[in-house]
Image: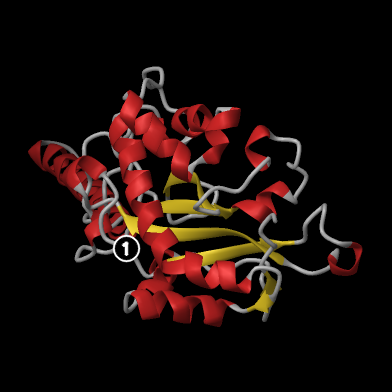
């Protein structure tokens, strides 16, 4: 075919081919758009070092422990008290603090910042050297005989430095909590020394002192290295650990918590256990 009709036919074919190609690419793009939803969240590009650190656990928006304080990176405290005769009978009888038992055999081990996930507690944070006020140091000796072995320095360096408190505040709070638990439990513990008891009996004694107090602590038991041979396989009470919120000023310990709410429970005590005897 010659003339203008031939040129028009070629132009029409070219237009048709272009139309087909445009339709094919449009269809492919539409399919791609359906394969990847447009409301998907963007891919995160921040590195682990630069990404914000979320709290590892949450106590819930209405729980005091869900609030944060400057310098505080934990969920609650464990106020840990040792039954001193059991501590000394567990391979520590040669320590200087084990020569006698003072007026408070339920003694301060430490005030520990804790996270809900067991074993994830903060520790060994940078802090100034321990330098307690002399009057406070003397008061601490009454509830923490381990100061004779420099326990207070270990506890400050390992645990206290991570609380956001200064050293005087930290040990003042520990003494306050220890005094309350000692008043609630010492009468029962001294009466039961050398005998079998149960978690229920100790919690009943605590609840008689203050309603609900028994739910705020857990018990730690295990066998003693220096127990009498007939009792080598029996669990003994080693520690009482109270669960306390960090809702005080600046992250200080404040409200006692039901330990079940922070996933802490008795360990090693079974249905009954023994209270180590007081020295005579």
Q: Residue at x 39, y 27 (%)?
A: 49
Residue at horizontal 36 percent and vertical 53 percent from the top: 177
What colouring does the structure picture have?
A: secondary structure
Name the residue: 32% across, 34% down.
Answer: 51
50 on left or right of 153: left
* Viewer-closest of 70 and 91: 91
Q: Quadrant of the C terminus?
A: bottom right
Q: Quadrant of residue 62?
A: bottom left
Q: Look at the image and tell me whether residue 162 can be seen.
A: yes
* Residue sticking out furthest to the front: 280
Q: Nearer the viewer, residue 8 or 273?
A: 273
Give the residue displayed 43% in from the left and 56% down from the top. Answer: 116
Residue 61: which quarter of the image?
A: bottom left
Helix, strand or loop at label 1? It is loop
- Splitting the image into 4 quarters, where does residue 181 fall? bottom left
Q: Residues within 10 Å of mark 1 (few under 14, many from 20)?
A: many
In the figure, is residue 213 to the left or right of 254?
right
Q: Which residue is mark 1?
A: 256
Residue 16, given in percent of the width and then of the height, sits at: 20, 49
Front residue of this view, candidates 255 and 141: 141
Nearest the camera: 264 or 128?
128
Image quadrant in which the N terminus is located: top left
**Numbered disc total:** 1
In the orientation shown, which residue stands out farthest toward the top? 129
Residue 156 image offset from top left, x and y in percent? 44, 31
């Amino acid at each position: 075919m010659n003339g203008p009709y031939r040129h028009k036919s070629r132009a029409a074919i070219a237009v048709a081919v272009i139309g087909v190609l445009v339709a094919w690419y449009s269809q492919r793009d539409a399919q791609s758009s359906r394969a990847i939803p447009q409301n998907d969240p963007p891919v995160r590009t921040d590195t682990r070092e630069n990404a914000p650190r979320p709290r590892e656990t949450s106590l819930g928006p209405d729980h005091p422990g869900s609030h944060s304080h400057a310098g505080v990176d934990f969920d609650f405290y464990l106020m840990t008290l040792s039954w001193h005769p059991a501590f000394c009978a567990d391979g520590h009888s040669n320590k200087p603090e084990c020569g006698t038992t003072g007026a408070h055999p339920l003694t301060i081990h430490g005030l520990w910042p804790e996270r809900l996930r067991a074993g994830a507690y903060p520790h060994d944070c940078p802090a100034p050297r321990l330098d307690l006020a002399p009057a406070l140091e003397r008061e601490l000796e009454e509830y923490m005989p381990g100061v004779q072995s420099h326990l207070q320095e270990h506890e400050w360096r390992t645990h206290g430095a991570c609380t956001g408190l200064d050293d005087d505040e930290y040990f003042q709070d520990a003494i306050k909590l220890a005094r309350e638990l000692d008043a609630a439990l010492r009468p029962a513990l001294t009466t039961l020394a050398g005998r079998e008891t149960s978690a229920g009996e100790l919690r009943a004694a605590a609840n008689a002192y203050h309603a609900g107090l028994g739910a705020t602590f857990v018990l730690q038991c295990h066998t003693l290295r220096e127990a009498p041979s007939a009792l080598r396989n029996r669990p003994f009470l080693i520690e009482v650990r109270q669960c306390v919120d960090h809702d005080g000023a600046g992250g200080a310990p404040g409200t006692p918590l039901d330990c079940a709410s922070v996933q802490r429970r008795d360990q090693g005590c079974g249905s009954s256990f023994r209270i180590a005897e007081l020295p005579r």
